[in-house]
Image (cartoon, rainbow, N blue to C red):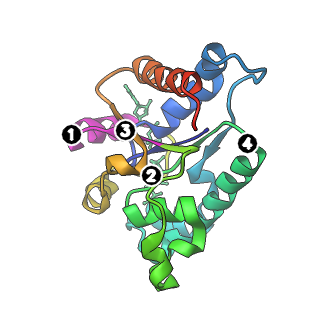
Amino acid sequence: MIYIIMGVSGCGKSALGAFLSEKCIHVCVSTNQLGWPLHEGDSFHPQGNIEKMARSEPLTDQDRLPWLLKLHEVIERERSYGSDALVACSALKRLYRQILLHGSKAFPSSGPDQDGLPASSPDVCFLFLYGDYDLIQQRMVVRRGHYMKADLLRSQFDVLEPPLDKENVLSLDIRTSITDMAMEVEKHIVSLKSSPRP
Ligand SMILES: Nc1ncnc2c1ncn2[C@@H]1O[C@H](COP(=O)(O)OP(=O)(O)O)[C@@H](O)[C@H]1O
Ligand SMILES: O=C(O)[C@H](O)[C@@H](O)[C@H](O)[C@H](O)COP(=O)(O)O
């Protein structure tokens, strides 16, 4: 299973991803793995995108496309191995999530096929971290050592299209602790393992 941890900047993607990867998942699932690999979306941005965000300029669709395509490759690689993995990526718009799942086939210019793409993949689940502007803004203001400052948060909310149920999503309330959110994810994993897909 691939879990894509998504939501606006500062919602806790990296914190939850690190916790799940290092501490939790290997305890609850009886595989031989020592935790699931975490692919941190920030590490896949072209340098120009990082510099732009550090100047407090929001990214455009055009800026995000190469980044999303790289993450799509990462996801495809993990899926081809049949591996379990975590990906932390804001995935703000429905189109971005379609690119993560389907690559360039999801581009609007791909013609009529694009409309027929499935909204979800059975082995990919989005973990949507949701919370209100004020709480996330407070957390971003005290976060240290990150290029993304709180003044871009409004633009992140402006762009956000919350995922629909049909996109295969588990929504998590960020007012709860990382430990509690991780327990929700564990329950989800256990329920999947105990009811195998047809
Ligand atoms: N559930 C939570 N409770 C309290 N603090 C949190 C929680 N989730 C994240 N944080 C803190 O909020 C800040 C932003 O989280 P971070 O993981 O960097 O978000 P993102 O990766 O989505 O930008 C960090 O300082 C992190 O420690
Ligand atoms: O699509 C975007 O505008 C960016 O990818 C953004 O959403 C992302 O969140 C940044 O990389 C900041 O990193 P954090 O999310 O870790 O703050």
Q: CA distance from mark 3 to mark 1?
A: 15 Å
Q: CA distance from mark 1 to mark 2?
A: 18 Å
On screen, 133 above or below 99?
A: above
Q: Nearer the viewer, mark 1 or mark 4?
A: 4
Q: CA distance from mark 2 to mark 4?
A: 24 Å
Task: Say if disc 1 is inside 8 Å of ligand 1.
Answer: no
Image quadrant containing the N terminus:
top right
Secondary structure under badge 3? strand
Hey, what amino acid is under mark 1? Asp
Which mark identifies residue 82? 4
Give the left or right position of residue 151, taking residue 42 as reference.
left
Secondary structure under badge 4? loop
Residue 106 % position (x, y): 51, 72
Residue at the spot 54% in from the left edge and 46% down from the top edge: 122
Hey, what amino acid is under mark 3? Leu
Q: Quadrant of residue 195?
A: top right
Image quadrant containing the C terminus:
top right
Q: Nearer the viewer, mark 2 or mark 4?
A: 4
Which mark identifies residue 134? 1
Residue 63 % position (x, y): 50, 73
Secondary structure under badge 2? loop
Magenta residues?
126-144
Which mark identifies residue 129? 3
Residue at the spot 47% in from the left edge and 61% down from the top edge: 118
Q: Nearer the viewer, mark 3 or mark 1?
A: 3
Residue 37 % position (x, y): 69, 36
Task: Say if disc 3 is inside 8 Å of ligand 1.
Answer: yes
Hey, what amino acid is under mark 2? Ser
Which mark identifies residue 90? 2
Q: Is residue 8 visible?
A: no
